[in-house]
């Protein structure tokens, strides 16, 4: 064999060995690497989604805390049912303090709602209009949740500036479910 032929055979063997190495080693390794890269990319996408979901969950947690604070605030404004007589006494004392005479105070049917009880009271007060207005302002300042509805004012014909007020005041109480 001549040296030129050896070089050609050696070159062909080298090319064949390169081809076989590429086909059986490098190509499968590249395919496996591409598959692993695709899995890593998919996991990165899921991780980004989880981060967004975590941020949203934290926002929901903050909103839930704010709602709980609001509920606690309003529940603090609702006295327990055992304090109905105290609230009624406060309303009566305020009316008397402003020189209003109470003709009638009647309790109406209690409305039992989930979380609170509404106790409507039908009241009829007689007195000076300015005193009644002051009564309403002071009633509004009580640390209780109250609602006045069906307010009717009638002017007293005999006395100037005197009125008869008919209204329903609803007092709200806690409804403790045990």
Image (tube, rainbow, N blue to C red):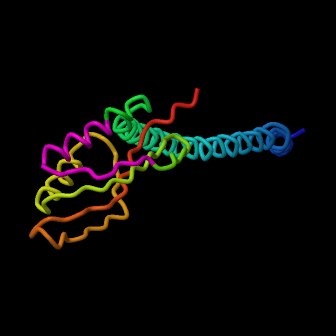
Percent x, y of residue 137 = 18, 53
Q: Is residue 9 left or right of residue 99?
A: right
Percent x, y of residue 38 = 69, 46
Q: Nearer the viewer, residue 105 or 120?
A: 105
Percent x, y of residue 131 = 12, 56
Residue 118 versus residue 133 in the image, above or below: above
What's the magenta region? 87-107
Q: Nearer the viewer, residue 70 or 32?
A: 70
Find out whether residue 93 is within the magenta segment: yes
Classify residue 145 by image quadrant: top left
**Quick one: which residue is furthest to the front in this view?**
158
Q: Nearer the viewer, residue 67 or 79?
A: 79
Percent x, y of residue 113 = 54, 46
Classify residue 48 by image quadrant: top right
Check the picture and name the quadrant holding the C terminus.
top right
Find out whether residue 34 is within the magenta segment: no
Q: Can the viewer see residue 11? A: no
Q: Residue at x 13, y 43 (%)?
A: 97
Q: Can the viewer see residue 93? A: yes
**Quick one: which residue is furthest to the top in this view?**
178
């Amino acid at each position: 064999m001549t040296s030129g032929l050896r070089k050609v055979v050696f070159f062909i063997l080298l090319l064949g060995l390169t081809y076989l190495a590429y086909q059986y080693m490098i190509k499968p390794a590249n395919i496996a690497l591409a598959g692993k890269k695709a899995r890593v990319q998919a996991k990165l996408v899921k991780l980004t989604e989880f981060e967004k979901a975590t941020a949203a969950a934290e926002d929901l947690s903050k909103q839930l805390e704010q709602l709980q604070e609001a509920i606690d605030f309003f529940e603090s404004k609702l006295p327990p049912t055992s304090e109905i007589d105290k609230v009624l006494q406060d309303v009566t004392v305020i009316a008397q303090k402003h020189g209003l005479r109470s003709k009638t105070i009647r309790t109406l049917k209690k409305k039992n709602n989930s979380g609170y009880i509404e106790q409507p009271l039908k009241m009829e007060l007689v007195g000076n209009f300015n005193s009644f207005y002051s009564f309403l302002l002071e009633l509004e300042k009580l640390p209780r949740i109250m609602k006045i509805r069906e307010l009717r004012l009638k002017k007293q014909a005999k006395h100037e500036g005197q009125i008869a007020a008919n209204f329903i005041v609803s007092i709200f109480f806690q409804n403790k479910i045990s």
